[in-house]
Image: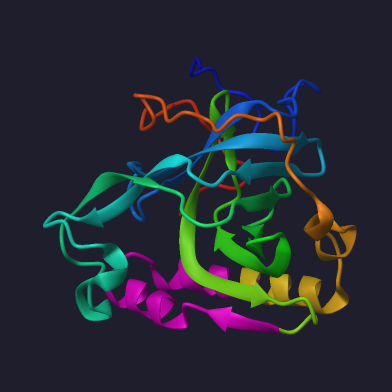
Amino acid sequence: MTADIVETTGMAGGAGWAPGDHILWRYRANASDAIHICRPVTVVRDTPEVLAVWLAPGTACVKPQLADGTQVHREPLSTRYTKPRTTALSQWFGTGVLKLARPGEPWSVWLFWERGWQFKNWYVNLEEPLARWSGGVDSEDHFLDIAVYPDRSWEWKDEDEFAQAQRAGLMPGEQAERVRVAGRAAVRLIESWDAPFREGWEEWRPDPSWTVPVLPADWDRIDRGRTSAHSRS
C-alpha cells in the first residue's frame, strides 16, 4: 500500500475501496500522533453513506500494553493511564466483528456475534471521526461507549475509564464535554432506532472466499498530510 492521502468524508472522487479490499483500521494513542492499535480488516461496503469492514477471527493485530509487559486491562485503573506503554503483536480471538462508520460521525458501530452466528449486541464506540488515507482509516478512542442489545435496550460502558482518562490528563474538559454531547446524540439515534440499527446488518455474513488480511511491517507509518472531517483536539 502507498501512503497517498484521499478524502476523509466518503469516497474520494467516487473511487472508494471495493468489497474484499484489505485496509487498516487504526487508533492513535490519546494526546499523541503515535499509532497504538492497528487491525487489518476487509472492506464490506464503501459508499458516501457508510464504510463497513470485517475484522476476521484470527487476524494479527497490534495492541497497547504496559512497558513491563502487563496487559492494559489487568493494570489497576488508578495507574492504567500513567505508566509507560509500548505496543505488542496480538491476535483477534473469538468471533469476528463488523464495524460500521458513517462520514463525520464521532463514533463507529460494531456488531458482535456468539459462536454459531447468534447475534449478541451492537457497540457504539465513541471516537474521533475517521481520518481516511489510502491504506485505511485512523481515529482516536474516547473511552466512553454504549452497548445496545437486540431488545433495543442500551447502557453506558467504561464510564470509569472515561473519568480516569480525564484525571490522568488524556482528555481536557472541553473535549470530554464534546464526547458527552456525542454520546447523547448516539443515544437519540438508538432510541429512534435509526440507521444503522434498523438496517439488518445483524443478518450479514462474510464472503467465504475472503482471506484473512496480513499485518504489514509498516503498520504504524504516519501520513503527515492526512486530514479529517473534524479537527482533532
Q: Nearer the viewer, residue 208 or 128?
A: 208
Residue 72 appears left or right of 161 = left
Residue 191 in percent (x, y) is at 81, 79
Residue stretch rendered in magenta on the structure: 154-181
| Residue 159 drawn in magenta | yes
Q: Main secondary structure of the magenta part?
A: helix
Q: Residue at x 43, y 26 (%)?
A: 223
Residue 83 in percent (x, y) is at 16, 64
Q: Quarter of the image holding residue 168?
A: bottom left
**What colour scheme does the image use?**
rainbow
Indicate whether 10 appears above or below 167.
above
Residue 63 appears left or right of 83 = right
Assign the C terminus to one quadrant of the image: bottom left
Residue 120 appears left or right of 177 = right
Q: Residue at x 35, y 51 (%)?
A: 29
Q: Nearer the viewer, residue 126 or 44?
A: 44
Furthest residue in direction left, as rendered: 68
Q: Residue at x 20, y 74 (%)?
A: 79
Give the number of callouts: 0
Q: Nearer the viewer, residue 160 or 150?
A: 150
Residue 232 in percent (x, y) is at 49, 49
Indicate whether 136 appears above or below 49.
above
| Residue 191 drawn in magenta | no
**Residue 229 visible (yes or no):** no
**Residue 171 visible (yes or no):** yes
Furthest residue in direction front, as rendered: 116
Indicate whether 187 appears above or below 110.
below
Residue 190 in percent (x, y) is at 78, 74
Q: Residue at x 42, y 75 (%)?
A: 162
